[in-house]
Image: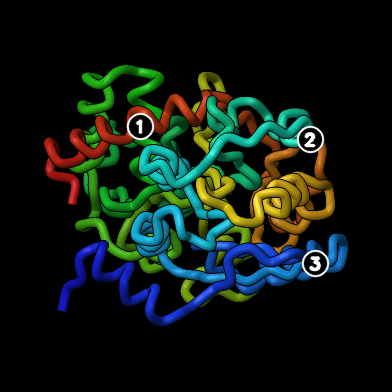
Amino acid sequence: MTLTKSALAAVLLASVAMPAFAEGQLNLYSSRHYDTDEKLYSDFTDQTGITINRIEGKADELLARMEAEGANSPADVMITVDTSRLARAKNMGLLQSVDSDILEDRIPANLQDTDNNWFGFSQRSRIIFYAKDSVDNPPMNYLDLADPAYKGKVCIRSSTNSYNQTLLAALVTHHGEEKATEWAQGVVDNMARAPQGGDTDQLRGIVSGECEIAVSNSYYFARAIRRDVSGVSADIAKIGWVFPDQDGTGAHMNLSGAGVAANAPNRDNAVKFLEYLSSDSAQSYFSAGNDEFPAVEGVELAPSVAKLGEFKADDVNLAEVAENIPTAQKIFNAVGWE
């Protein structure tokens, strides 16, 4: 049975109840599905005495829930991955502006919404990976992925993947819609297989020999350095990587970020939580616990992340990129990117 968004939200509402205003509490809606985030939440409670009540789910489910709850929503903070979902939450009217000197000082301007509806707290770079034993001249930038020289060699996720949507939106921002469309068509022509699986599956495709070039977020690879990841870690020495566009705009960065809910009953606690996420201790844990790049400059990287090496990151304003996500989806549909 397929549920509409409103029906799905009703099921979610019926299944879990949360308190609204309660002194010393925070209601967190999270689509981050990492067990390691438990340390983030427990440290916040230890530092502030504020108890976190958490609901976890897929981003679209949580957005539907908040929309259905309306003004009666108990949500204080929405935390999710990727700029596209943060922008969607803002455009649905589910977030509110936050005026915080701490956040303005700590979070780079290009990693926050222009209206301060959301802030980025950790980053992942969209990297090009390749098979060392068969690729002597890997793509050095994203546009190269469309080069006919790589026909039948590229593995990449589907067009419904938010990471790819944001990447293409960034290419629209930098190069315009026409060139971005040419790129998307070229990548489709170069695919080794129809898009399938997650980012880790693209890396597994290199190990298995199904593809010679793959696109994946950095933290999936760094995780395979830090601990055993089936189908990747045992043969990780076979995989090389490139931070794209180092002579140009820099490597594209995907965000994990958060905002204060539009109807937050515990607003002051919500702002405290966002400010905590920008602290050195929380920023360090994003790297150590989940192999991500901190949003705040100067925070020490986990060894698995540092091993990827230094690189130039694209400093494009991600709020501007978010505005081009509908155009990116239109392009995907036009070129037949599954």
**Amino acid type, callout 1:** Ala
Q: Which mark is residue 169?
A: 1
- Mark 1 element type: helix
The residue singled out by tag 3 in the image is 45
What residue do we see at 24% from left, 53% from top?
A: 192
Q: Secondary structure at mark 3?
A: helix
Relative vertical location of residue 20 with respect to residue 244 in this rendering, above or below: below
Determine whether, in the image, residue 5 is placed left or right of residue 126.
left
Q: In the image, residue 155 lies at what x, y percent?
A: 32, 53
Q: Are marks 1 and 2 in contact (CB under 8 Å)?
A: no
| Left or right of residue 130: residue 143 | left
Q: Nearer the viewer, residue 100 or 159?
A: 100
Q: Is residue 175 above or below residue 189?
A: above
| Mark 1–mark 3 distance (CA, rounded to whole Å) | 37 Å
**Which corner quadrant of the image does residue 54 belong to?**
bottom right
- First reached walking from the N terminus: tag 3 or tag 2: 3
Query: Amino acid under label 2?
Result: Ile
To which quarter of the image does residue 118 belong?
Answer: top right
Label 1 – label 2 distance at C-alpha: 29 Å
Viewer-side label of 1, 2: 2
Give the percent coordinates (x, y) of residue 129: 47, 49
Q: Which residue is mark 2?
A: 102
- Could you tell me which secondary element the residue under label 2 belongs to? helix
> Can you give x and y, in whole percent of width and height, for residue 257 in the image?
57, 47
